[in-house]
Structure formats: C-alpha cells, structure tokens
Amino acid sequence: MLRSRRRTPRVLAAAVASGALTLSAAPAASFAVSSGSKPGARTTAERVAPYTTKTPISRGTGGAVTTVDPEATRVGLRVLERGGNAVDAAVAAAAALGVTEPFSAGIGGGGYFVHYNARTGKIRTIDGRETAPESMPRTAFQDGNGATRPFDDLVTSGVSIGVPGTLATWEAAADRWGTRSLAKLLRPAARLAERGFVVDETYALQTEENQPRFEAFTTTPEVFLPGGEVPAVGSLFRNPDLARTYRQIARRGAGWFYGGALGREITAVVQSPPKNPETTLPVPAGYMRPRDLAEYEVIFRKPTRVSYRGYEVYGMRPSSSGGTTVGEALNILETFDLSEMSVVDALHHYLEASALAFADRAEHLGDPAYTPVPVRRLLSQEFADERACELDPDEAATKPVLPGDIRTADGTCDLARGAGAIPRSDTEGRETTNLTVADRWGNVVEYTLTIEATGGSGLAVPGRGFLLNNELTDFSTTWVADDPNRLEGGKRPRSSMSPTIVLRGGEPFLALGSPGGSTIITTVLQTIVNRIDLGMGLRRAVAAPRATQGNVTDVTAEQAFVDRFGGPLGALGHTFVVGEAGTSAEDIGALTAIEFRGRNRLVAAAEPTRRGGGSALVVNDR
Ligand code: GLU
C-alpha cells in the first residue's frame, strides 16, 4: 500500500502553499540538508517555530513530559510550569501531537489513557478506543461477490473508520482528574496549528509514503499536500483548519463533535467518501451515523496488574491486548532468572515468552463487551508457570506455538494446550504515538493514541484539518465465528496499545509506552526486561536494538539487533527479518518513559534516533 522508497529529503522549495507561510529561507541546519546558510543560523521557519531541538534524555525534578515531538513536549511542560497537573499536561500535549503528528494521532482516532493518582495511590484507565458503527454488518469487509477485500483497500476507505474516542478521552480525563477546562487545554495546540511547526524528515517521509492515498480523496491534499507537494524538510507547516476546529470545540464543547454539526460532517464523508475521480483505489464507503457519535462513550476501567520481581506492573485491560500480553509474558519470564543468564540467553527467553503470550492473545483477546476475556486466568501465575514449561532454554520453538489450555491450568508441566488454535495474522499498523507525563505532586499519565495506519484512512474531514482513523482494520478482516476479534457492530477492535505504569512499594518506578501496532507489546516488554533484568539504565534500555516475536515464523528485528545477536540467536533456531531501511518500517517503536528516583527526582527519556528522535524535558533541570 505505502510507497516505501526514501527519496532524498527535499530542500526547502519556494512555498508551502495553501494555509502555510511562504518562506524563502534555507532549511534548518539541524536537518543537515545542503544550504547556503551559516551553520547554526536560524531559518525563518525556525524563528517562527523555535522548538526543533530533540532532547532524548533529561534529569531533574518538578515534573516531566516526554513525547516524540519537541513542540508537543514544550506544550505539556508549559502547562506543568504554570501549575497544571499531569492530566492537564497530557491532554494539552496530546492535542499538540494532533498538530505535529497528524498521521499518527488526533481527534479522528482513539487511544488508552492510564493515570496514577498520587493522592489515592490508585491507577485507573480510560478506554477511548474507537467502536464499529452499530449498523455495520459482519460482511462489511467483503466486496459485492462476498470475497474479503484486500487489506490495503480496506485501509483507505470509509469502511475502516471507527467512531473516534480521542476527544471524549481528553474531556473525560480533564473532567475527572484535571484542573483545567478542556477549552483551556486546547488553546496552546490551536496556537501551534496556526503558527506552524518546522517539517522534519520523518514528517516529510510519512507524507510522501501516503501521497497516493491522500490523493485518493479530494479533501486530504488541501491540508497535507499543500500546492500538491510533499512539504519540504525545513519548511513551516501550518494547519489553520485544525486551529479553527480546536477553537470551535473549545467554544462549543465536545458535543459539537459527538452529536453536533461536526459529527454530521464526519458521518457524511464516512458514508460518502469524497473520492478523487482519478484514483484507482476503490475507497469503499462506511457505515457511521450521527447516532454512533452521539452514543459514543469512553470506559473507565481498572488496570491489569501483575507482580514481577518485586515490582507491580499495571497495564491496559481489554479492549486492548496490551496489559494481558505484557503481563503474561512477564509472568512466564519470572520463572527464569534472566539476570544470571548471558544477554543472548535472556533475549532468547524474551522472544519465546512473547510468542507464547501472543498465542494466548490470539485465542482469547477481544472486546470484553462481546466476548468473555479470561483476564484473571491469563494473568495467573499458575497459567504462566505451565506456559513456561514449554519454553526450551536451548532451542526456539517452531512458530506458531499453540495457546495453552486456560481451563485446566494448574501450574504443573502437563503441557496442556488449547484445542484447535488458529494462528491469526496481525495486520495492525506500525504508527501511533505515545506520551508520558509526571507532575510535581507525583501524579503520572501514560497515554497511547492513534489513528491506526500512518495517515489513518487517508480521509481528512473537509475544512477541519484532521484525518479519520482506519482502526476497524484491527478487527480480523475475515469473519470466523469463534474468533474473539471478529467484526461486530458497536464493538471495539482489539488493540495492542500498552501504556504501562510500574510501581515499587506502591510508588511509581517507571512509566512507559510506545507506538508500533502489535510490536508495542514487545517494545514495552523488552524495555522492562532491559531495565529490570539486564541492569541497563533507562537511556540504554530505550536505545537498545529491538526485536519482536509475535508468534510468527520470523523474528522482526532492527538491523542493529541482527548485527549484534543474530549469530548466536540464529544458532538457537531464531530466524530474522528486518524492516526496509529508509522507510518508516525500519524502526521498531518510538518509546517514551519516565523513571522515578528517590527525593522526587525524575529521568525522562525519549528515543535518541528512532522516528527522528523524541523530546524529553523536566521542569527543573538538575
Ligand atoms: N491500531 C493499533 C493498536 O491499536 C496501533 C497502531 C499502531 O501502533 O500503529 O494496537
């Protein structure tokens, strides 16, 4: 679907047309593209939008914000500096990510919000996942002949668009735990959308990869391909439509979206996508009605919880598979002493435990309102003990491995397996975004939000400056009766998002999360293992090369991982595939994390290089 060739980043051309400033300056020095300007000189774009510096790690006190984007991190930090709490900062930063990461997140999508309340010591979560429209038939993914449409045709469509939950999440979080109104929290992002941000290589690459899909619609190029072009690296990108949308929401409330005029605009384009007559993509229409939006509700849920080597690990319950899959894998790993092993052996155990947990995920995980999900049993140590019996310390199992028999699990090595397991493929995107926030009072937010594929459905709401998700392709696209993730009207598609908060002695120790579709689970898991078992500091734990085993034949890995561990892990039977260099599939994840040290000290971390690097800042530098 996506073009994956990386072109030489364009130097700043003349103009970023509609809605953007026309600038004549050279590109930003920090993007290392040829220019006539003096090294270090600030371009016109940078003078307008000064926050381009990526700071992957910061230490200090008073609170912290870490996201993939320097502008969004700044927005969150300023809220903290002005006395807002972690929830206020998280909502404001998320709204800013809707501006600077519009292909990963925004009010056209959904997500999961995890909150640690310092006053009560409790962790609670918000499930802001998209839902399938009520009237969506189980045949919705089929063409007129009853054949399942090709996956890519479903992505760029109206039919994959779920009822968005992001704005409702912001409103619910701000109302329940915040100290500022949603209206106030949207203001900095509205200003950012208006004044613009400096286009970096990642943004230009993501636009370029999506160009054919965006051009399938008449509405999307107007916003994201100004003048018909991919915006140049170093240019200023403005989104005045989104600025206006945020301001209108601030004035009219989220009801304008959920049940109001904006909602009707959304359902109109879902039901009748504004298709470019020249596109060769089929762009099937969707089912969302105004009523689906009016009836949408976020769900406050208790978190999942497992104990792991003296830590308590809290995650997201179904409809996400994040908490149960990370938790089960940790329970399996806890039966082995990884810290006594060589790194290669520890990684072998990590990959094998992931595969086992993914087998059980495929068997049991779906929206709990539609399918019983045995969360307690999946997270029981007896079940994990039994699953651990299947992990051969000296040899990789042939994949896919079968799920365990959850009904008979008693912790003994009788190798009971679930019957009739159908390994189901994962087709989730590799995008999304994640943020981590802590405030001076000790409250913590871990929040993952998405529009699914990079660029979501590719469909921008006319004149409103944001894209709609394609989250419904997270359902199995072929309908099978006993599949817990089969498509049904009103249901939430299974997610992998894994915002996670780790406590020690009831106090926050680590908060972390990542984008990356089903690799989110393994990125969070591998980083916990790096930090807790392999003795890495947070910076190294985040930067370390990644690999992911979702119970498929080959381990997907970063090139650096294969270079370092491919030989010895290959000798244990693991085989590897690497995402294509120079594409957005090259990296696995884009994690953010905060570690809590004694005396209110924090270490905030973002990626040093993945997705161009992120930005982690603390209120008071040490
Ligand atoms: N849709 C995916 C999920 O909910 C996330 C997509 C991504 O990370 O790119 O797990």
Image: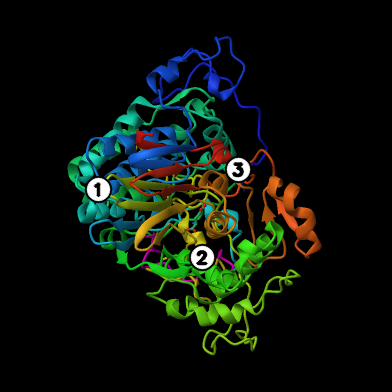
User: Which marked residue is nearer to the observer: mark 1 or mark 3?
Assistant: 3
What is the basis of the colouring in this image?
rainbow
The residue wearing badge 1 is 261
Instruction: From the viewer's side, name the closer residue of 409 and 334.
Output: 334
Give the residue type that dot 2 points to.
Answer: Val
CB contact under 8 Å: marks 2 and 1: no
Instruction: From the viewer's side, name the closer residue of 399 and 600.
Output: 600
Spatial separation of the CA atoms under disc 2 and disc 1: 40 Å
Q: On the picture, is 310 further left or further right than 588?
A: left
User: Which marked residue is nearer to the observer: mark 2 or mark 3?
Assistant: 2
Residue 390 place in picture, x, y as percent? 66, 78
The residue wearing badge 3 is 584
User: Residue 219 occupies which quadrant of the picture?
Assistant: top left
Spatial separation of the CA atoms under disc 2 and disc 3: 24 Å
State whether residue 66 is above or below residue 405: above
Segment colored magenta: 128-145
Give the residue type that dot 1 points to.
Answer: Ala
Residue 528 place in picture, x, y as percent? 52, 57
Secondary structure mostly seen in magenta is loop
State whether residue 510 is above or below residue 403: above
The residue wearing badge 2 is 326
Packing grade of label 2 (10 A; few <14, some 14-19, many >=20) is: many
